[in-house]
Amino acid sequence: MHTVNPVSYLQRLTFLLCFLAMGTVVFAQEKSATEPRKENIDWNQPIAVASIASVDRVLEDIDYLFGTVDKPEYPAMIKGFLAQYRDLEGLDKTKPFGVLVYLNKGISPQPTSVGFVPIKNLDELTETLSEVGFQLAPVEGTEDRYTLALPNFSVHLKLAHGYAFFQLKSEALDRDFTDPDTYTKALAAKYDVAGSLLLQNVPEPMRMMAVDLASAKIDEQLPRKRNENDFQYRTRSETTKFLLNQFELVAADGEDLTFGYNLSKADKQIQLHLGVKAKTGSKLEAELKNASKATSQYSYLNAAAADFLAYNVFPLRKDFEQKAILDLIEKSKANVPPALLGDDSTPGSVAKMIEAGKATVRSGKLDGHVQILQTSKGKPAVIAALKLTQGNTFKEGLQELFDLMLQAEDTQGMEKNVAEVDGVTIHKILPNNMKQDTKEFFGENPVVYVGCGPHACWMAIGEVSSLELLKKSIANGQSTRSKPGSAFLISLKMAPFLSLAEKNAKNREMMEAAKVAFAPGGDLLTFYPKITANQASLNLDLGEGFIRLISLAIANRK
């Protein structure tokens, strides 16, 4: 059984969602003969839905979007345009509208898209359409069929459940439609715009054919590439096979795949979501339930408090990652002076550190983090940590190493035991010959702090004042609990890095707009997976500064 890696869902879901969505449509159009289907298929159930929450929600979003940059004339212009069309009277502007995708009945089913819009008053809608030159007329001999005459073609409509279903071909409407609210209500509650591939409604042969195609394509890519070493080849090969296995699992056990976009006024964010839901009682559900228990020791860290933050729990398979890392550690011992290695009866300082490192690798996972914080002087400091299995052994070896180094003549700027926080002893190193760009980033006199305690090894790079940031981070780790189910996160504040980006910026106008957009704050970008007992998703949250940037880009467009 594969070890469940929560972080691998980042790669896995992107691949699965895109391929399955495309694969379903591709195979729906296959003309080759297939075996008669052994499953009962409800051809009136859609295989996919795409929807917009409502007209009112769109207008509210437009108000908020341009309100962030004080540009009320743009929403007013759009509302003025709609007023020319009677403000869309006749439509229910509080309900979702969009497209449903169905399969036509047959051995080789073809996909058919059917649009749907909510109707509040058919007479009012008829008048609205007539004012712009479009004629809506009932089809003779029917109670629910209409034809909308446009300048160059006609659209056929069917009324049901308070909606108008429409398509260019009349026969596409010859089905018993399910109320769109069945599929759109949950989406509209979370997202402004959303799309969902309803895997449970896709015939199993079609899903498995998508897997077969993926397998064939992957087989073509598996042979070793030119100039690829053993480690690179095996990494690529193992990762590809693992993704294929998970792809097949989602194809077989996935209930739906969903993409959603939301402009949240309450959270002042753009929120993007890409996720999969597992069928009840399936193998995929069991894997997700197991993966949802994984948590990084450093998930207590606050993304909003750091210019940059990343934490990750990375699983190590015994016969692959563990073996590769342990081999690398063994080879590195050749560059270590024998006095620092010692022997089996009396291990040296570095030997103790190596043994603790090996024990951590053999534990089956690496759990670490890195963050960039601002010092009291406004310069960045990099803080990092790695969870250790035998932290006290590493701590002892590190202490002995500093004791030995300080016996040498040239130890200027090196100090041992400069601080201790919650069992973590911190030492100081003053690097020599620092490059000018490093000094520009960290300050004129950057130093390195290294510390180790019973559970982790810590490091800080920055000015002397970065020591206080390191001590605070260590103390917070002891007093703050990790967040369940949080195995991976990357966050970035844009404003502090604009000066670096500006040097190589090609679009000067966009760079100036970014400065204005991010100046009031709201510059945080956060990317993270979320895994529960039956769902896994990738999530991207963009602060209000990104909303301002989009508004300015539209307003400043020439």
Image (tube, grey):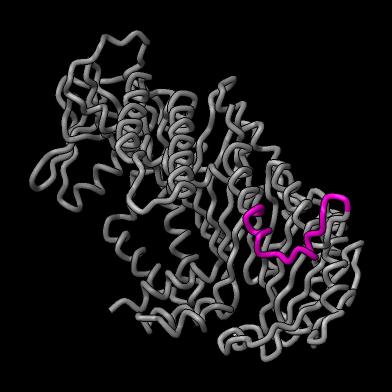
The answer to whether 235 appears left or right of 364 in the picture is left
The answer to whether 48 appears left or right of 126 in the picture is right
Q: Is residue 164 visible?
A: no
When asked about the image quadrant of residue 424, the answer is bottom right
Residue 355 on the magenta span: no
The answer to whether 140 appears left or right of 474 in the picture is left
Frontmost residue, 321 versus 329: 329
Residue 343 on the magenta span: yes
Q: Residue at x 62, y 49 (%)?
A: 327
Q: Position of residue 247 (x, y in %)?
A: 44, 33
Q: Is residue 2 visible?
A: yes
The answer to whether 213 appears left or right of 73 in the picture is left
Q: Position of residue 243 (x, y in %)?
A: 46, 37
In the displayed structure, would residue 286 be above or below residue 152? above
Quarter of the rendering occupied by the N terminus: top right
Total number of numbered labels? 0
In the displayed structure, would residue 159 be above or below residue 448? above
Task: Please state the extent of the stretch shown in magenta in the rendering.
Answer: 329-345
Q: Residue at x 63, y 44 (%)?
A: 322
Q: Residue at x 43, y 33 (%)?
A: 244
Q: Position of residue 69 (x, y in %)?
A: 48, 76
Frontmost residue, 103 versus 459: 459
When asked about the image quadrant of residue 86, the answer is bottom left
Q: Residue at x 82, y 54 (%)?
A: 343
In the displayed structure, would residue 267 be above or below residue 432? above
Q: Main secondary structure of the magenta part?
A: helix
Quarter of the rendering occupied by the C terminus: bottom left
Q: Position of residue 406 (x, y in %)?
A: 85, 79
